[in-house]
Image (spheres, grey):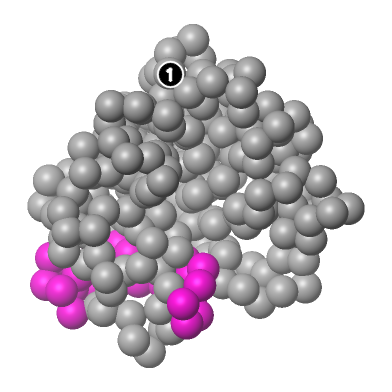
Amino acid sequence: MRIATWNINSVRLRMELLLRLIDEANPDVICLQETKCVDQEFPHKPLEERGFVHNHVHGMKSYNGVAILSKLPLETRDIQHWCKKEDCRHVLATLPNGIEIHSVYIPSGGDIPDPEQNDKFAHKLRFVDEMTEWWAAKRSAGTPMVVVGDFNIAPLEHDVWSHKELLDVVSHTPVEVEKLTAMRNSIGWVDAVRHFVPETEKLYTWWSYRARDWAASNRGRRLDHIWVTKPLESHLKSHRVLKDARGWEPKPSDHVPVLVELAV
């Protein structure tokens, strides 16, 4: 089973690129973030024509939005809200093989890494704290689960182009790293991509739109993640980070798709 996650930055604007992902990578399940589309306007037809006839979408106009698109039936569907906001950041579903899959979009947190000066950053920290508590209280480490999405945090030294220069930049600050690490430890999540790629190797999934030549400067960050619970660790078969998708035309997302394959 091949699972892809992608912050697509508007599913309607980038449907052509989503279809390209399907044609080139052949995923069985696709989790999207930042769909920026109300549910009634989600473009199902071209996806159904490629076999994605099962879906769970939760979106809003212009902002946020998450989705699970699947060739496999979704036996249960649910939505989670965080920080007393209904801002379309978390959907989950159960696949026929019993695996529960979550598509999550953690808030970006604005530009100032101080919760007292920046409400967006405070919201981000609360969001991760609430999720950490929820995993431990509502889910078991022994349940086969996959959580994917744009976590908007690059936790490791080589998840950013410069650890030293980004220590005070939102997405790589020590407090964010500490909180995301606590969430990963809550029920013993396994970082599926780093299962294949040593922590000493640079690994990015996002390159800023602000870069004049993103490929030449290569100032990336690993903001997009796939985690699995321990029962699935031994089933991890392969991974892909589609770096070339950052240059796909027309109008690429600033994030690229990340995939893992599970032998299940």
Look at 72% across and 65% down and name the residue there: 82
Viewer-proximal residue, 218 or 257? 218
Outermost residue, front side: 212
Figure quadrant of the N terminus: top left
Q: What's under tag 1, amino acid-wise?
A: Lys
Using the rendered view, name the quadrant where residue 104 is placed: bottom right
Residue 75 x, y percent position in the rendering: 42, 68
Which SS class for mark 1?
Answer: loop
Residue 195 x, y percent position in the rendering: 45, 21
Question: Which residue position is annotated with label 1?
Answer: 202
In this picture, which residue range is highlighted in magenta?
A: 45-71
Q: Is residue 89 left or right of residue 49?
A: right
Residue 169 x, y percent position in the rendering: 65, 36
Q: Residues within 10 Å of mark 1 (few under 14, many from 20)?
A: some
Regarding residue 204, the answer to whether it shows in the image is yes
Look at 73% across and 47% down and name the residue there: 112
